[in-house]
Image (tube, rainbow, N blue to C red):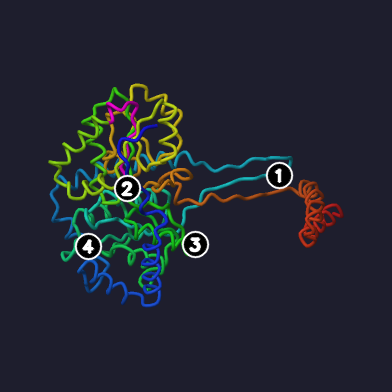
Amino acid sequence: MKTIKEGNHRLFENDPETAQVVSAMLLDLEKNGLAAVRRYSEKFDDWKPTNFELSPAEIRSAIARLDPQVIADTHFCQGNVRRFAEAQRATMAPLEVETRPGVVLGHKHIPVSSVGSYVPGGRYPMFGSAQMSIIPAKVAGVKTVLACTPPVRGEGWYPATINAIHAAGADRVFVIGGVPALALMAFGMGVVEPVDVLCGAGNKYVAEAKRQLFGRCGIDLLAGPTEIMVLADDSADPALVACDLLGQAEHDPNSGIALVCLSETFGRQCLAEVERQLAVLPTRDIAAQSWGANGRIYVAQSPEEAVALCDDYAPEHLEIQVLDPAYYFERLTNYGSLFIGEETTVAYGDKSIGTNHILPTSRAARYTGGVWVGKFLKTVTYQRMTREASVEVAKVTARQCRVERMLAHAITADVRVERYTRR
């Protein structure tokens, strides 16, 4: 491997300063409730409404302000997400099997009761994120979905976001941003019942809040600042590769941006293209920070090494623009979502194609996938037995318990042997 451009990455990972800030905020929010929410909302967002929850009339008013094309396009995107979520749900069948004569084991999928969805805003009003958590939860059968989204600083809610949240099926909508939003949903604060699961992407503070709240409630996954890796061979178009790298660089100064290629010549062509495109990019103020600090270009000596580099990086988004995509599709294992061929790009997954864009970052793709309908279902097991089967299993169980010196456990098996053989 050769490195053409070095960069930082994992700036979110193991950040003690972020953890300390979030911990102090959560303690304050749990102790002081809505008063603390109001204080932080005014401080960070210049937002101090009478009520953070939108009424049905306010939701209708927000939607009425939208261009019909925005509503139609949102319907298109959400329809794709819903269809894919429904197809995923259809694969999750209940199971019941007789493993021995008279021993029936099974599992079933039960939706959690309530979900708190965080729809990020801040620098960009990412209303497309609404469908990524709300729709899979509703398809799973979740009864109550709360949604929180930040205001546009000093202005209030963003109409396209409110439309997306409402159309996706949220039951209640709150205009609150960041850590206070997650705290409201996790703690309840007398306004809502505490949710069972928190979900949604956000900045490093949102991701850290989810990490610290895990245990009090469930979380979908840790989705911090975005990442892209492009794996490209010499058959790819350097201009298109550079375009896709910068597409993610505009998200956040902490975005992770990386290219793995198979020749130094191609890598340097891409580097030149990034610099050329950056000069005229409308969002270059952010993208240039991200690329300058975090951008990386690796030259792999072989396809095998390219696969190893990608799997070690474990990116949130992985694009493969190569002559033989099947080779890489069969071998790559660590990614949040895979984009195969130049015909697809991360923006499609982020906005419209139907797969989910709430994906693992900071190498979490080594052990989890992204949000899907299964994130909101508990797979629980059950067992049922005849008396004859109970006797057979009880004798083995009692002996095993005594080897472990767990005598009370053994007795629970013994009494069944006595009861069912006597009768």
The magenta-colored residue range is 256-267
Q: Amino acid at mark 3?
A: Gly
Secondary structure type for disc 4: loop
Q: Is residue 176 above or below residue 289?
A: below
On residue 226, which mark appears? 2
Asked if the stretch drawn in magenta spans residue 95, the answer is no
On residue 151, which mark appears? 4
Query: Label 1 belongs to which residue?
Result: 103
Q: Relative to 416, is 200 on the left or the right?
A: left
Q: Is residue 236 above or below residue 104?
A: above
Q: Amino acid at mark 2?
A: Thr
Asked if the stretch drawn in magenta spans residue 259, the answer is yes
| Cα gap from disc 3 to disc 1, whole angstroms | 34 Å
- Dot 4 or dot 1, earlier in sequence: 1
Q: Relative to 155, is 165 on the left or the right?
A: right
- For the residues labelled 2 and 1, say whether their Cβ atoms are less than 8 Å apart: no
Q: Amino acid at mark 1?
A: Val
Q: Amino acid at mark 4?
A: Pro
From this viewpoint, which residue is outermost toward the right?
422
Q: Quadrant of the C terminus?
A: bottom right
Q: Nearer the viewer, residue 139 or 387?
A: 139
Could you say where residue 18 lies in the image, as x and y percent from the top left?
36, 62
- Dot 4 or dot 3, earlier in sequence: 4
Q: Relative to 9, is 283 on the left or the right?
A: left
Q: Is residue 381 above or below residue 179?
A: above
Q: Nearer the viewer, residue 402 or 393?
A: 402
- Dot 3 or dot 2, earlier in sequence: 3
User: To which quarter of the image does residue 178 belong?
Assistant: bottom left
Query: Label 3 belongs to which residue?
Result: 215
